[in-house]
Amino acid sequence: QSLLRYIAAGLGVSYEQLSRNYAQMSYSTARASANESWAHFMGRRKFVASRQASQMFLCWLEEAIVRRVVTLPSKARFSFQEARSAW
């Protein structure tokens, strides 16, 4: 039980949610804990989704440039490989 508490603290969730043991909690406490965790997970989900989408877009753009589906402007100062963040 104490090991699960340490793991829950490291993950940022409550012990009850990690162990699924709600026997010693009142309904109000369980609901408050669930609401707090829901906000945490929604923020984390947005962060992970936006990062994943950015990486996928950069991979797609690189392949599109290599296949010449997308062409870079003729006056571009840097190629895509030289300055990925600029594109």
Image (tube, rainbow, N blue to C red):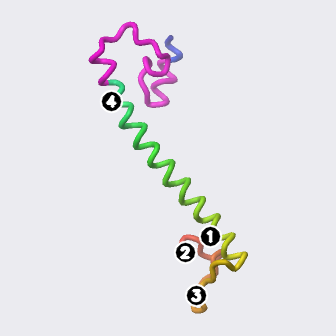
- Looking at the picture, which amino acid does disc 1 mark? Leu
Q: Residue 86's x, y, as percent?
A: 53, 75
Q: Residues within 10 Å of mark 3 (few under 14, many from 20)?
A: few
Specify the segment rendered in magenta: 5-32
Q: Which residue is mark 2?
A: 87
Mark with earlier residue (1, 3): 1
Q: Residue 47's x, y, as percent?
A: 46, 49
Q: Which residue is mark 3?
A: 73
Q: Which residue is mark 1?
A: 61
Asked whether, in this view, residue 52 is left or right of residue 20, the answer is right
Q: Residues within 10 Å of mark 2 (few under 14, many from 20)?
A: few
Q: Which residue is mark 4?
A: 35
Whether the residues at callouts 1 and 4 have beta carbons within 8 Å, the answer is no
In the displayed structure, 46 sits above or below 53; it is: above
Secondary structure, mark 4, is helix
- Looking at the picture, which amino acid does disc 3 mark? Pro
Q: Nearer the viewer, residue 58 or 84?
A: 58
Mark with earlier residue (1, 4): 4
